[in-house]
Image (tube, helix red, strand yellow):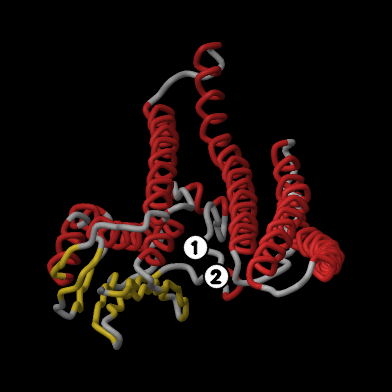
Amino acid sequence: NTLIIIASIIFSSWMIYHVACFLLEGIGNFDQQRQQQFNATLFQYMWVFSLIGIVAGGMLHFYLTRKLVHPIRKLIFSTKQLQNGTYPEPIQIPYKDDEISELIYQYNQLIQQLQANEQERHRLVTDLSHEIRTPVSNINGYLHGLKSGMIKGNKDLFRDLHEEANRLSELIDQISLLKEWNDTSKQNFVRKEIINIYELIHQSVNLFRWKLKQANIPIELDVQPMKGCIYKEGFQQILHNLLDNAIQYYEGSGSIMIAGKAVENNKYHIRVSGPSQPIPKEAENKVFERFYRIESSRNRLNGGSGLGLAIVKDIVEQHNGKVGVKSEEGITTFWVCISLH
């Protein structure tokens, strides 16, 4: 680049010098001595201007090149660190509103996303190892005892083994469903359609009628009719998980209550309430975390995977909504508020 700049300036000066001399010689009334004097003076000035142009151009080129190359070198170094398995520190953005700054910003966002994904993967693997270990150990222990003759098979034992196998299968299904909703939430487009919410809630409740009858649990509905543009499968999954949670942890007397009403800004508010053990205040924000349990032993006995409410939260956030829980006087109420557009 420097050689090109020098050559361009010298060539331009040479052309200007010869053109000026030729024009003056053709239209001027100078004698030969004055013409030579003019040519010599012009030659000196052209050399001075050329040197000034070369120095100024070189300095400007150095500054612009350094401004461009320095952040790119940082990107190269940071990329090498990432290639070696080390997450680099975010690169400082030296300037604003230019392509290099935008590239650095997007690169920093990529690093943050990779770190978040790695942390999430590590946490999920750790939680899965912990959650799956218990039913697998129980099943292996019983089977080893049966194989060695240390214990005899009976109806109760086989029922316990079946329950452990069902719990393991349910946990795997919940994990697959959670991954599906995570993948869906990252898509820019989610298929939504105009749905009659009143009918959809009744359809979802009807799927639990037999289970509610078997558990001798009454249910009441107070749902305001309304239509909205929602993700049908996601909405059904929200209702399924909240109602299943209410049945699973039902304790006491009284009905499970499902209420739904339209609120401002074209949103719909749903409450699922039922008698149960109270949830401590400090745990209200944690129950939507994956694998979180208030009382591990009690929930393991009931077969809860600790993923149902986490799935609810993911789907609700996908609908630009909010989710929460309130527990008082022996009644626990889970509520969601989702957008209908």
Judged from the image, the secondary structure of the residue bearing numbered disc 1 is loop
Q: Which residue is mark 2?
A: 285
Q: Position of residue 212 (x, y in %)?
A: 24, 58
Left or right of 224 in this view: 287? right
**Quarter location, residue 188:** bottom left
Q: Are marks 1 and 2 in contact (CB under 8 Å)?
A: yes
Q: Position of residue 244 (x, y in %)?
A: 33, 57
Which of the two residues, 266 or 24, is positioned nearer the viewer here?
Answer: 24
Could you tell me the amino acid type at mark 2?
A: Asn
- Give the residue drawn at x 53%, y 71%: 284
- Give the residue drawn at x 43%, y 46%: 179
As drawn, 303 above or below 272: above
Q: Quadrant of the C terminus?
A: bottom left
**Quarter location, residue 233:** bottom left
Q: Which mark is residue 288?
A: 1
As drawn, 302 above or below 339: above
Q: Position of residue 248 (x, y in %)?
A: 38, 56
Which of the two residues, 82 or 65, is positioned nearer the viewer here?
Answer: 65
Q: Position of residue 200 (x, y in %)?
A: 17, 64
- Give the residue drawn at x 24%, y 82%: 261
